[in-house]
Amino acid sequence: MIVPNFRRCSQLHVVSPTILKVDHALVTALVERWRPETHIFHFPTGECTITLEDVALQLGLRVDGLPVVGPTMFDWEEM
């Protein structure tokens, strides 16, 4: 369902299978420091959150131009 939307936006590379190196120790450390009630990582040096800009940079998404929108008439209870 999401792939056609990425295809229309010329961003199909985001959902295409790629080979990623996963640092399991880093992932574990981040999971241990995540606080779901505040949506923030708690580190000894302070707090850190993830922004939409961070996601765009990591995934290589373009963030200039008009926003991409779709229908919003969903029955959220059904979904």
Image: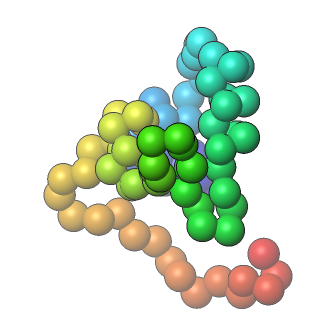
Q: Is residue 5 above or below residue 58?
A: below
Quarter placement of the N terminus: bottom right
Does residue 6 appear left or right of residue 15 in this picture?
Answer: left
* Picture residue at 65% right of the left edge, 44% below the top: 33
Q: Quadrant of residue 78?
A: bottom right
- Find the residue positioned furthest to the left: 65
Residue 65 or 59: which is nearer the viewer? 59
Quarter placement of the C terminus: bottom right
Is any part of residue 20 visible from this angle? yes
Tally of marks: 0
Residue 1 or 79: which is nearer the viewer? 79
* Picture residue at 50% right of the left edge, 78% below the top: 71
Q: Quadrant of residue 76?
A: bottom right
Q: Is residue 42 above or below residue 66?
A: above
Does residue 31 appear left or right of residue 72 in this picture?
Answer: right
Image coordinates for residue 42, horizontal then vertical, percent: 57, 49
* Picture residue at 65% right of the left edge, 83% below the top: 74
Residue 5 or 65: which is nearer the viewer? 65
Image coordinates for residue 51, horizontal then vertical, percent: 40, 54
* Picture residue at 33% right of the left edge, 50% below the top: 53
